[in-house]
Amino acid sequence: MGEVLALRWQDIDLDDDCPTATICGTIVFVKGQGFSRQDRTKTDAGFRTVILPGFVVDVLWRRFNDRAHPARGQHSINAVFASRNDTWLSPYNVGRQWREVRNQAGLEWVTLHVFRKTVATVLDDAGKTKEASRQLGHASEEVTKAYYIAKPKLVPDVTDVLDALGPRPRSITEAILAEKSALARPIEGALCGSAVRQAVAVPPP
C-alpha cells in the first residue's frame, strides 16, 4: 500500500498511448515527523513502471480533474492520494477505512493484500507468471508462486473407496494366464495360415 500512497502526479503519464505509473517510492514513518515519502522503493525490484489498465486510467483522470489545486504560492506535495491538509496519507488509517468499508459490504475476508494475490493469480492463469512477478515488484518468480498465486487445495485421499467403482483387480495367477494367452494367439494364427497355404499348394489326388 505504501507504494500506491507514495505516487505523485509526475510519476503518472496518462497522455501516452499506453498510460503508465512509475513506482519509485513508498510511505515510511519517521519518529518526530510522522509519515513521509521515501524516494526509493523497499527493494530494487520494486522500482518499476507499470502499464495501467483502462479502468484505472479512468479513475485517475477523474481524480486529476477533481483534485483541489493549492492556492498561489502554497506548496503542494502533488500526491495522487493526499490528506485534506495536503499531507501524505497514513497506511494505517487507509487500512482502517478499508476494513470499515469491507465489513459494511460483508466482505470481511478481503484484505488489501488480497488484491495483490488476485492480480498474481489472474496473470498466472493466463500463463503470465513472469509478468505477474514483475507487475508486483518481486525479485523472483519463486516469491510470486510461493506466496501470491492461489493454489488448488489437496482433497483427502479416498481412493480406497473409489477403487470399488472400477474393474476388479486381477490376481497374479490371472495376470500370468492372460499374458500367456496373448502370446499364444500370434503362434496359433501363424500355424493356421501355414495350414491354409499347404492346402492350397497341394492339388487333390
Image: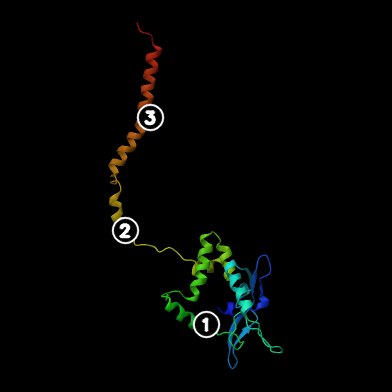
* As drawn, 121 above or below 67: above
Which residue is denoted by mark 2 in the rendering? Answer: 158
Q: Which amino acid lies under the numbered mark 2 shown in the image of this protein?
A: Val
Which residue is denoted by mark 1 in the rendering? Answer: 94
Quadrant of the image for the C terminus?
top left
**Looking at the image, which residue is at 60% across and 75% down?**
62
The residue carrying pointer 2 sits among few (fewer than 14), some (14 to 19) or many (20 or more) residues within 10 Å by Cα, namely: few
The residue carrying pointer 1 sits among few (fewer than 14), some (14 to 19) or many (20 or more) residues within 10 Å by Cα, namely: some
Whole-number angstrom distance, CA of label 1 to CA of label 3: 79 Å
Q: Which amino acid lies under the numbered mark 1 shown in the image of this protein?
A: Val
**Looking at the image, which residue is at 60% across and 70% down?**
58
Which residue is denoted by mark 3 in the rendering? Answer: 186
Whole-number angstrom distance, CA of label 2 to CA of label 3: 41 Å
Residue at the bottom extreme, as displayed: 32
Residue 10: horizontal and vertical position, in percent?
68, 77
Answer with the quarter of the image where residue 77 lies: bottom right
Residue 43: horizontal and vertical position, in percent?
61, 76
- Nearer the observer: mark 2 or 1; the answer is 1
What is the secondary structure assignment of the residue under circle 3? helix
Q: Earlier in the sequence, mark 2 or mark 3?
A: 2
Q: Earlier in the sequence, mark 1 or mark 3?
A: 1
What is the secondary structure assignment of the residue under circle 1? helix
Residue at the front extreme, as displayed: 66
Residue 109: horizontal and vertical position, in percent?
43, 74
Quadrant of the image for the N terminus?
bottom right
